[in-house]
Image: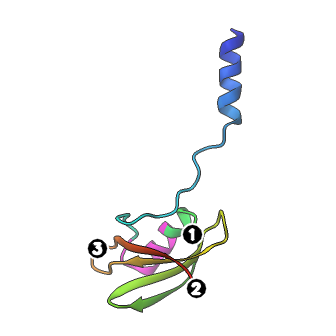
Amino acid sequence: MKLNLLAVLALMATPMAAVAMPVVGDMIGTDPETAKAALEAAGCPVDEFEAEDGKIEAKCKDAATGAAMEIYIDPATGLVTDIKAGD
């Protein structure tokens, strides 16, 4: 019984799965509202969107580290095609 109680307490003390940053291949969306919501849910609040080399560039910050990120999205599919550290 004590072992079961300890196991339950250990699980309760363990934080839930961390919010994962987007990775290449993730579906973000093709319209700004959907893309912004998906990136914010992934822990990268969007500062702005820009068009760059035929892709949508979302400039955001990693909520966990504060690091600036540039997420490139294919406008036809809504998939992440590249991720770079921001300037």
> What's the residue type where badge 2 is placed?
Asp
Q: Say which residue appears at 32% left-offset and 89% top-offset.
A: 54
Which tag, 1 or 3, sits closer to the chain's start?
1
Residue 44 badge: 1
The answer to whether marks 2 and 3 mark residues whose Cβ atoms lie closer than 8 Å is no
Q: Which residues are magenta?
A: 29-38
Residue furthest out toward the top: 1
Q: Say which residue appears at 66% left-offset and 24% top-offset.
A: 8
Left or right placement of residue 35 versus residue 17 in this view? left
36 drawn magenta: yes
Residue furthest out toward the left: 76
Which tag, 2 or 3, sits closer to the chain's start?
3
Tell me the residue that label 3 is attached to. 77
> What's the residue type where badge 1 is placed?
Cys
Instruction: Note whether 35 is above or below 52 in the view shown.
Output: above
Q: Quadrant location of the C terminus?
A: bottom right
